[in-house]
Amino acid sequence: MRALVKSADRPGLDLTDIPGPVPGPNDVVIDVRVTSICGTDLHIFDWDAWARRTVPIGIAVGHEFAGVVSAIGDEVTGLTVGDRVSAEGHITCGHCRNCRAGKRHYCRNASGIGVHRAGAFADQVLVPAGNVFPLPDDVSDEIGSILDPLGNATHTALAFDLVGEDVLITGAGPIGLMATAIARHIGARYIVVTDINDYRLALADRLGADRAVHVGETPLETIEAELGMVEGFDVGLEMSGAPAALADMLRTINHGAHIALLGIPSGPFEIDWNQVIFKGLTLKGIYGRRMFETWYKMTSMLHSGLDISAVITHRFPAEEYEAAFAAVREGRTGKVILDWGRASPGLGVASQLQAEAEHSRMRG
Ligand SMILES: NC(=O)c1ccc[n+]([C@@H]2O[C@H](COP(=O)([O-])OP(=O)(O)OC[C@H]3O[C@@H](n4cnc5c(N)ncnc54)[C@H](O)[C@@H]3O)[C@@H](O)[C@H]2O)c1
Ligand SMILES: [Zn+2]
Ligand SMILES: [Zn+2]
């Protein structure tokens, strides 16, 4: 099968042929239709220090995908060949205290699909059955392929109550953009999104921000004054990993406010602890998605009208992966899709099934 593999100890990836997976008793093999590129994949492509000490040479990369179950192990229950699915990319150990308590997102021994073990940028991916998430009919393959980062956005946005609150989202990357749409969907009052990238700020407008602010050009205090937000933001969602963004947030947030931190800084950095202490702030680190509460919440929100489709801005066939990664690196993108040639991109399931029917009729 085709797979996008880290085949040598150097930057880059190779699209090559490798043997397909064979399921163990509790595994599922999924025929991959659509995948999506994550910042993590770019780190692996570029082969930075983190990637070099984390990723084994020779594995397929990628963890954001949607596809169809094509084989199941003997012990698997509740899934059938032909099911349209995505999957949680964190494989948890099952025996640590948190796993046993049903808090799998706090597992201390988790390993990652496409990071520590064979990934989904391939014609097929093997996933333990317990990690598979069946896609509701109203979730298209493309949206199915971005449930992993939508899950990060959902986990962060639902960490604190946003209803009727003024929300600051720092970082209009794909996850900040999707968090903007969620905050709007669930009833925040003002949503202010910051970035230093005009292309992404324009997308933040489309996803429902009241103000999309270039922090190099306009101080947040000006925006707060314009909106009549006299006491400051009520909730902050940090989605950039930039130290300057957290400093902006600590400075402009109200006393007693809540901050959820998703963005991953490149290393340790200083913050003004006086802001945290004298304002009585609550800071919460967010990692991954709650298994599987986040998955149910996000698919329910999609069902009730959450529209994140504008976050997908670019689509490439898998063969053009180098151009796709270049686009992600350049940053004038939302989410970038890599298509493995089995789905009709951008179509909902109904029209997709129609296209498939069309296709098989044409084949006779
Ligand atoms: N905790 C987790 O489980 C988890 C999972 C996925 C991603 N992440 C992290 O979450 C963050 C968001 O992910 P993404 O895929 O959207 O990333 P991204 O890198 O595409 O987006 C980050 C955005 O922040 C912007 N930015 C840079 N400096 C800024 C500043 N001073 N103020 C405001 N914005 C600034 C960048 O221009 C960029 O658009 C990243 O840091 C990523 O590493 C964390
Ligand atoms: Zn991801
Ligand atoms: Zn565990």
Image (tube, helix red, strand yellow):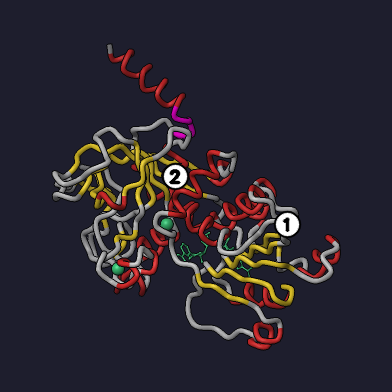
SS at mark 1? loop
Q: Residue at x 47, y 54 (%)?
A: 151
Rendered location of residue 267, percent (x, y): 48, 80
Disc 2 target residue: 337
SS at mark 2? strand
Disc 1 target residue: 164
First in sequence: mark 1 or mark 2? 1
Q: Residues within 10 Å of mark 1 (few under 14, many from 20)?
A: few
Rendered location of residue 102, percent (x, y): 36, 63
The answer to whether 227 is drawn above or below residue 242 in the figure is above
Residue 215 image-quadrant placement:
bottom right
Residue 320 visible here: no
**In the image: residue 212, left or right of residue 106:** right
The circle drawn on residue 33 is none
Q: Residue at x 22, y 64 (%)?
A: 57
The amino acid at mark 1 is: Gly
Which dot, 1 or 2, sits closer to the camera?
Answer: 1
Q: Residue at x 74, y 53 (%)?
A: 210
Check if residue 348 falls in the magenta segment: yes
Which residues, given as a range, are shown in magenta?
345-349
